[in-house]
Image (cartoon, rainbow, N blue to C red):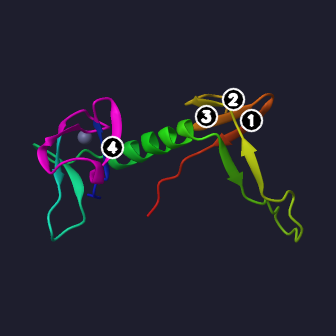
Amino acid sequence: MRALPFALRNHQIVSIDEVPRGLSCGCTCLACGAPMVAKKGDKHAHHFAHYKGADCAHGLETGLHLRIKAFFRARHSIVVPALYLHRQSAAYFQPYLFKYDRVEEEPYVGQLYPDLILRKGQRALLLEVAVTH
Ligand SMILES: [Zn+2]
């Protein structure tokens, strides 16, 4: 089971660094809603664990998805990297700063289901969040 760096406290997503140690952190699991303990010892990296029972299977991925969505809601721009098409040496487009004023979560566009759509006027940037090591 991977360590959980985020939990829910007072309807806000918080990191392990933002809360006091132990059950007094007042946090719940982002995925299943169970009470969480903030483990902040000296031996292991600080993390949240379910107070009772094993950690749930989707806690980490759910937590990271919610955290990154909150990150984009709080910002209004993103650097879009250059796009290189297969076997093309010149970039299809160069990196640019995309400024947006609306964020749609869990939208669908035709048959696409991105995690987020960042919008500015008629322009839209579709984002899919991938959780990896
Ligand atoms: Zn859980």
Q: Which residues are magenta?
A: 9-35
Please identify the quarter of the rendering in which residue 100 is found. Answer: top right
Side (left or right) of 70 relative to 59:
right
**Camera-side residue: 76 or 30?**
76
Label 2 to label 3, Cα distance in Å?
A: 7 Å
On the image, the x and y values in percent for residue 83 come to 79, 59
In the foreground, 74 or 112: 74
Query: What amino acid is labelled 1 in the image?
Result: Ala
Report the Cα–Cα distance between label 3 and label 4.
Answer: 26 Å
Question: Mark 2 or mark 1: which comes first in sequence?
Answer: 2
Q: In the structure shown, which secondary structural element does the residue marked by tag 1 occupy?
A: strand
Query: Along the polypeptide, which appears first: circle 3 or circle 4?
Result: 4
Quarter in which the C terminus is drawn: bottom left
Name the residue carrying label 4: 14
Q: Residue at x 68, y 31 (%)?
A: 101
Q: Amino acid at mark 2?
A: Val
First in residue order: circle 2 vs circle 4: 4
Q: Are marks 2 and 1 in contact (CB under 8 Å)?
A: yes
Cα–Cα span, label 2 and label 1: 11 Å
| Residue type, numbered disc 4 | Val
Q: Position of residue 81 (x, y in %)?
A: 73, 58
Q: Secondary structure at mark 3?
A: loop
Magenta stretch containing residue 10, yes or no?
A: yes
Mark 4, mark 1: which one is toward the viewer? 4
Name the residue rendered at 29%, 49% in the picture: 18
Say if mark 2 contacts mark 3, CB within 8 Å. Answer: no
| 55 or 38, nearer to the observer | 38
Which label belongs to residue 113?
A: 3
In the rendered image, which quarter is residue 82 located in?
A: bottom right
Q: Label 1 belongs to which residue?
A: 124
Please tell me whether mark 1 or mark 3 is closer to you in this view.
Answer: 1
